[in-house]
Amino acid sequence: RTVTSVADIACLLALMFKYSCEHSRIIVYQGGISYTNLDLKSGTILDNMHSIKAIPNKSETKNFQIESGGDLPRCSLLNIQLERELYDNLVLLSSGVKNNDIEFMKEWLSVYRTHINEQLLFVNVDLSANESDLVGNSTFENENDICIAGFSDSILRFVAERGNKGQLMYV
């Protein structure tokens, strides 16, 4: 089976980041519900990809939170701030961020950088674009905010090289 949907690509990329980073968290967000603290099996990325894609269909899933409005897991992001979790990179894999979510994300990034990590690298990857491109940064103000449209090996390499100490070079 081939990887063709935006959800497939996002899931695959998230797992690649997870497997290559020392400390990471995957938040799966779909239809107003975010799923956190995912139990990944020891196995291949593809095995875990199928497990993650099946999560929204599992009635016994316990690690979920109902989110309010928008296309971002706002409550999960706010919890990261409240728990003062230190991350060097935040990669948002989506099929585009809508205007009301852009304002929330800008405010979230400002608060996170002020109180937790001023050097946070934020990469917003719109996987729904047909062509890969580094998008002009008019949406976000910080030099550590990167907006990318589409996906290719060169985009992954760019994100890896921008990360602290080449954390994602393995991917």
Image (cartoon, rainbow, N blue to C red):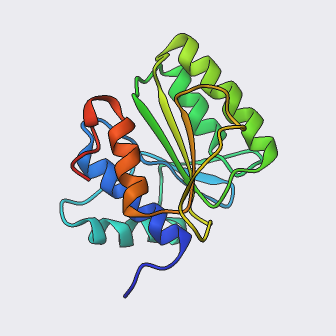
Tell me where residue 139 appears, x and y as whole percent: 72, 38
- For the image, the number of numbered tags is 0
Q: Quadrant of the N terminus?
A: bottom left
Tell me where residue 113 appears, x and y as whole percent: 54, 18
Query: Furthest-bottom residue in view?
Result: 1
Which image quadrant is residue 86 in?
A: top left
Q: Is residue 72 left or right of residue 58?
A: right
Q: Is residue 7 above or below residue 146?
A: below
Q: Is residue 26 above or below residue 127?
A: above
Nearest the eye: 152 or 39: 152
Query: Furthest-top residue in view?
Result: 115
Tell me where residue 67 appears, x and y as whole percent: 68, 46
Q: Is residue 137 among what the camera can see?
A: yes
Which image quadrant is residue 13 in?
A: bottom left
Q: Is residue 58 among what the camera can see?
A: no
Q: Is residue 66 left or right of residue 93?
A: right
Q: Is residue 137 above or below residue 95?
A: above
Which image quadrant is residue 159 in?
A: top left
Residue drawn at x 69%, y 55% is 32
